[in-house]
């Protein structure tokens, strides 16, 4: 047994601040057992080579061994509520068409005309049939061939062999996932026991209140890693340190998903002063000037967490009713950030955020970051917000619908392209690559361990297996 | 009145924004008569003033405050 496998030694390597579990001990409400779960697995302390972020060969390997075999979130069910509604999901050089068929079932097809290869549909929206804009070949919503102009000229075309090529489509939490591998394990099996983390706040009962699609000048993994640890708070988001236990969070890995819990309402252990509850209230709610200690936002004798949680309950009460009284302080104050391998990031409780990261077309040093704000609602489901595209030369500040989150993202945007550029230099001067933390990078290490399995590469990037895709049992092509 | 933020890790520095979006940083050395200030852009690049360094991410945050405040004000005018 190594020192890092020893639970006591592992604990000693945690932050000098309170642990999340100790914070839970102070909760004014009953804490659900799932928040008491801890994964103490040691996921490694090795460096990770930068090639996988900057080398085209890794992008090609992802095209061959990752994207064709993994479940990917394509859209929300609410975006295709009626028969004939479609959503186009593009991943690298493959386009997939998701549709609700006439009997209400959600199906997915490769978005390509079987005639001459034109993309069948250019964009989302309702359709009575799938008619190629080029020569007019046409398919029913169930994927069967419907019509071929100049039918006499195509003697080899048979209805039964010219259906659209289907892609697996399954749902979880109101999301539609697709998988190009017909032999892939079912989505719910892939997700394992993730439902236990969301059963108190089902994501299918949300609607898209906002959806931004930001183009970024960095690899998709560079982008998502900017959001997968709280360690960067001290330098990237210093303004929130007075109300954020930045290095005190909890990181867990379970099967194909991982969880980060970041604490709000406990000051960073890096501060040399002690913020008051009112300092925290002013910062967290952006309602006052934290240079003024006498605002009196929080009643005497009440902690900021207790006050903030109660404010959160009252904010949600019109939608959730008295069920809000069952929510503990942590569920209303802290951030529960999940990652489902490889690129889907739903937040639990009422943070309302969901991210998805993927390459920008076939370009390995550019990416697309989708941010959904999934709000709870009562009564009739509101219509989903349309995607708001933010081009490379725009920023999240151009999306005021994100509110204060835009300010946080704007800070992250400063880093991501510079990390991408910097890694080209890092490869020259430090061949071992990036040095991740042992604990706070647990989610990221978990991702890379799975990534290496899918791609069939060693941790040093030198022992690439050419013949099989480890972890999937698939033959490489 | 513009928002003033005191840097949580370097409490002697006060961050605010000007009407044109420049970020102003004031160094408070009350008592030694050496108060200094400087202006910076949204990446922390020094623009003018006798204070020449600032936390780029605090500058970015204050700049974003200014941007959103300006957008909110424009929205109110359009209502």
Image (cartoon, rainbow, N blue to C red):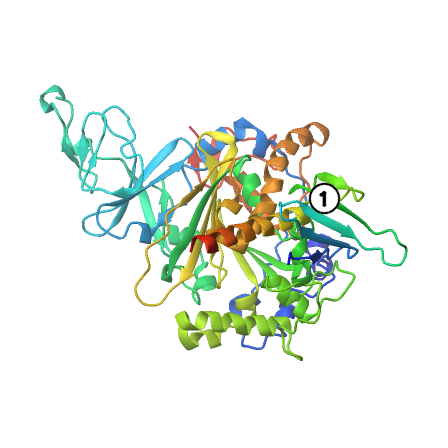
Residue corresponding to mark 1: B39
- Which quadrant of the figure has residue A98? top left
Percent x, y for residue A460? 63, 34
Percent x, y for residue A399? 48, 47
Left or right of A48 in this view: A374: left
Helix, strand or loop at label 1? It is: strand
Q: Does residue A373 lie above or below A287 as drawn?
A: above
- Which quadrant of the figure has residue A242? bottom right
Residue B47 in view (yes/no): yes
Q: How many marks?
A: 1
| Mark 1: few/some/many CA within 10 Å (<14, 14-19, 20+) | many
The residue at 68%/29% (across/down) is A425
The residue at 33%/38% (across/down) is A96
Q: In the orientation shown, which residue stands out farthest toward the front?
A: B77
Q: Does residue A24 lie above or below A226 as drawn?
A: below
Left or right of A172 in this view: B43: right
In-front residue for pair B71/A108: B71
In-front residue for pair A409/A205: A409
Q: In the orientation shown, which residue stands out farthest toward the left?
A: A152
Q: In the orientation shown, which residue stands out farthest toward the top?
A: A153
The residue at 69%/57% (across/down) is B5
Q: In the orientation shown, which residue stands out farthest toward the bottom?
A: A301
Percent x, y for residue B35? 83, 52
Percent x, y for residue A222? 57, 39
The residue at 11%/23% (across/down) is A150
């Amino acid at each position: 047994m190594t020192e890092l496998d020893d639970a006591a030694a592992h604990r000693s390597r945690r932050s000098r601040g309170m642990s999340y579990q100790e914070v839970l001990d102070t909760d004014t409400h009953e804490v659900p057992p799932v928040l008491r779960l801890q994964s103490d697995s040691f996921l490694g302390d090795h460096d990770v080579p930068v090639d996988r972020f900057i080398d085209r060969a890794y992008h090609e390997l992802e095209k061959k061994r990752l994207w064709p075999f993994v479940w990917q979130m394509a859209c929300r069910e609410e975006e295709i509520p009626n028969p004939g509604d479609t959503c186009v999901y593009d991943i690298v050089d493959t386009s997939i068409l998701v549709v609700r068929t006439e009997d209400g079932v959600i199906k997915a097809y490769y978005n390509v005309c079987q005639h001459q290869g034109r993309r069948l549909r250019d964009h989302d929206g309702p359709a009575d049939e799938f008619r190629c804009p080029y020569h007019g070949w046409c398919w029913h919503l169930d994927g069967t061939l419907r019509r071929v102009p100049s039918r006499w000229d195509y003697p080899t075309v048979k209805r039964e062999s010219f259906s659209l090529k289907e892609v697996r489509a399954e749902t979880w939490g109101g999301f539609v996932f697709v998988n190009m591998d017909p032999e892939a394990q079912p989505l719910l099996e892939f997700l394992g026991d993730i439902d236990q983390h969301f059963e108190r706040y089902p994501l299918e009962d949300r609607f898209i209140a906002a959806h931004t699609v930001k183009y970024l000048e960095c690899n998709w993994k560079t982008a998502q890693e900017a959001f997968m640890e709280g360690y960067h708070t001290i330098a990237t988001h210093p303004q929130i340190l007075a109300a954020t236990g930045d290095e005190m969070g909890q990181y867990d890995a379970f099967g194909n998903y991982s969880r980060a819990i970041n604490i709000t309402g406990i000051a960073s252990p890096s501060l040399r002063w002690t913020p008051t509850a009112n300092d925290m209230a002013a910062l967290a709610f952006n309602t006052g000037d934290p240079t003024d200690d006498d605002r009196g936002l929080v009643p005497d004798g009440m902690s900021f967490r207790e006050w903030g949680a109660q404010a959160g309950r009252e904010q949600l009460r019109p939608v959730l009713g008295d069920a809000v009284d069952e929510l503990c302080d942590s569920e209303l104050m802290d951030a529960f950030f999940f990652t489902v391998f490889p690129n889907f990031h739903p937040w639990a409780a009422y943070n309302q955020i969901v991210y998805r990261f993927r390459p920008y077309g076939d370009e390995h040093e550019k990416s697309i970051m989708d941010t959904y704000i999934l709000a709870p609602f009562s009564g009739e489901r509101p219509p989903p917000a349309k995607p708001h595209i933010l081009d490379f030369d725009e920023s999240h500040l151009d999306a005021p619908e994100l509110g204060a989150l835009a300010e946080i993202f704007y800070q992250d945007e400063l880093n991501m392209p510079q990390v991408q550029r910097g890694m080209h230099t890092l490869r020259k001067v430090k061949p071992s690559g990036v040095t991740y933390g042992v604990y706070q990078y647990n989610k990221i290490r978990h991702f890379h361990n799975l990534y290496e399995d899918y791609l069939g590469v060693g941790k040093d990037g030198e022992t690439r297996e050419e013949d099989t895709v480890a972890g999937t049992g698939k033959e490489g092509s | 009145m513009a928002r003033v933020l005191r840097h949580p890790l370097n409490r002697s520095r006060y961050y605010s924004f000007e009407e044109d979006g420049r970020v102003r940083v004031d160094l408070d050395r009350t008592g030694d008569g050496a108060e200094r200030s400087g202006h910076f852009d949204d990446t922390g690049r020094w623009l003018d003033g006798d204070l020449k360094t600032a936390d780029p991410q605090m500058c970015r945050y204050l700049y974003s405050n200014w941007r959103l405040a300006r957008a909110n004000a424009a929205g109110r005018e359009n209502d």
